[in-house]
Image: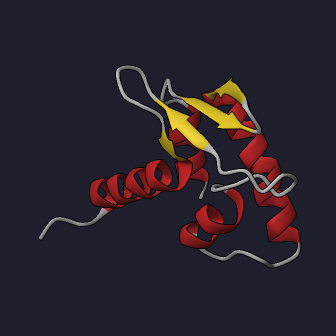
Amino acid sequence: MEQLIDALGGSGCEFERNGRWYDGARAATHLRRKQAWLLERDLISSSEQFIERAGTQSSMSGRAYQVRCPGREAMPSARWLNEALESLRARTSPSR
């Protein structure tokens, strides 16, 4: 989960929540707070659960998060995070 949050924080992309765009560093801080809250309550144990329960929408308004990267259109954060997770796993999987 931490590598995934770091990937967003260092991506150069912007993160939209509740109608406002934030840089990756602020997005990472926000998602770490949500992650900590969920971990304290034993509500997540995998990156997929983190994406589903913390990275897709505002828990206050219910509005979906978006990610906008330079040169690309905004996309749902769930898509961006799942693609980033897949990429991270591909880079760290052992060679055959």
Residue 48, position in %: x, y? Answer: 54, 70
Residue 78, position in %: x, y? Answer: 53, 56
Q: Which corner quadrant of the image does residue 28 belong to? A: top right
- Which residue sits at x=61%, y=29%? 24
- Which residue sits at x=77%, y=39%? 18
Q: In this view, does 66 lie above or below 22?
A: below
Q: Looking at the picture, tell me which residue is in the foreground, 81 or 1.
A: 81
- Which residue sits at x=55%, y=48%? 77
Q: Specify the quadrant that holds the C terminus.
A: bottom left
Q: Specify the quadrant that holds the N terminus.
A: bottom right
- Whether residue 60 sits left or right of residue 54 in the image: it is right
- Whether residue 81 sits left or right of residue 37 in the image: it is left
Q: How many marks?
A: 0
Q: Which corner quadrant of the image does residue 49 belong to? A: bottom right
- Which residue sits at x=35%, y=59%? 86
Q: Please say which color scheme the image uses.
A: secondary structure
Q: Looking at the picture, tell me which residue is in the foreground, 30 or 73.
A: 73
- Whether residue 19 sits left or right of residue 79 in the image: it is right
Q: In this view, does 13 lie above or below 87?
A: above
- Whether residue 68 sits left or right of residue 50 in the image: it is left
Residue 41, position in %: x, y? Answer: 88, 75
